[in-house]
Amino acid sequence: MSSHAENTALAAVIGLGSMGFGMARSMKHAGLEVVGYDIMPAAVERFVAEGGRGAATAAEAARGADIIVSVVVNAAQTEAILFGPEGIAGAIKPGAVFVSSATMDPAVARDLSQRAEALGFHYLDAPISGGAAKAASGELTIMASGSKAAFETARPALEAMAAKVYELGDTAGTGAAFKMINQLLAGVHIAAACEAISFAAKQGLDLGKVYEVITASAGNSWMFENRVPHVLAGDYTPRSAIEIFVKDLGIVQDMARSERYPVPLAAAALQMYLAAAGAGMGRDDDASLARLYAQLSGAALPRPNSENE
C-alpha cells in the first residue's frame, strides 16, 4: 500500500455539488489525480476548468480508480450508484475502496458494505460534517468505520479532505450511527434557535442585540450562532435545507423506534421541519423554521434587503 501513502492514488468523486466539488478540489490540491462525475454536466465542466478530469458516466469515473468517494444525499442514491441499473459496482477494481459520505441508517450502511465486500472491493462508512466551506478548504470532520484495508486504501483521500478523521470501528454502520447522534443534536439545536429568535421578535426585542447577548451567554449554541444571522439578514438561501432534517430526524425516529428508545425532543423538532416543508419551505435554508414560527405567531422577522427597498 506504499503507493497510496505517496499520493499516487487515482480518486474518483461521484457527485460534484457544493460538498463534492470542494472535496474533489481538496484531493487534487493534495496531489491526487482526481476524476469527477455529476448528473449535471455543468458541474463536471467546472471541475475540468479547474484542472480536474471529467467523466461522462459514474462507471467511467470509477473504472480504474483506487478510491471512489460518493457524495450524494441519502442511502437510496448511494445504493443506486453502486447497484442500480447504471451502477458502478461492476466497474470497481478489486481492492479499491468505495467511500460513502451520505448520512444514512446504520443498518443500511452495513448492508451496502457486505454487498460491496462480497464483490471484492472495500466499503468505508464515512459520513461528513462541516459544510461546503470546510469541504473546499479540506477541513471536514469525517466519522468513519470500516476494515483496516478500507482505511489504508482511503487514507490519501481522507487526509486531503479532512481536518479530523475519527476512526470509529472496523464495521460499517458505526460511522453512520455517530453521524445520526450529531444530526439529532443539530436538528434540535436549529429548532431551538429558531423558536427562541422568533419568540424574541414576538416580544418586540432588538434582534441584533438578542444575538449579541445570547452568543455571549450560557444559552448560546453553535447552531444559534451560525443560523440566526440568516434570520437577521432575512436570507433563506439554502446552505442546508429543511428537507435534510426531514430526512435525518426521520432516520433518528426509525432507529429509536426499533430500539424502543424515546426521543421526544427530536420528535418535536421533526414535526416543525415537516410543517416547514409542508408550507413550501422544504428547499429553503433550515433557518426557515423561524419563518414558520413567525407565521404561526404573527411575529415580525427581518425581511430580505430587496423587500425593504
Image (cartoon, helix red, strand yellow):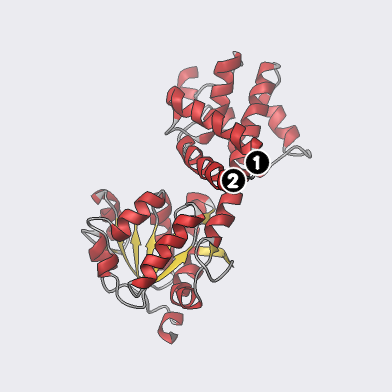
**Which residue in the protein does label 1 denote?**
262
- Classify mark 1: residues with Cα within 10 Å, few (<14), some (14-19) or many (20+): few
Estimate the x, y position of residue 279 in percent, counting from the top left: 45, 23
Estimate the x, y position of residue 73 in percent, counting from the top left: 41, 48
Estimate the x, y position of residue 192 in percent, counting from the top left: 65, 33
Query: Does residue 194 show up?
Result: yes
Residue in view at x 37 percent, y 68 percent: 116
Q: Secondary structure at mark 1?
A: loop
Marks 2 & 1, CB-CB < 8 Å contact:
yes
* Picture mark count: 2
Q: Amino acid at mark 1?
A: Pro
> In the rendered image of this protein, does residue 283 appear above or below residue 154?
above
Q: Residue furthest bottom?
A: 2
Q: Residue furthest top?
A: 298
Q: Secondary structure at mark 2?
A: helix
Residue in view at x 40 percent, y 73 percent: 31
**Which residue in the protein does label 2 denote?**
256
Q: Amino acid at mark 2?
A: Ala
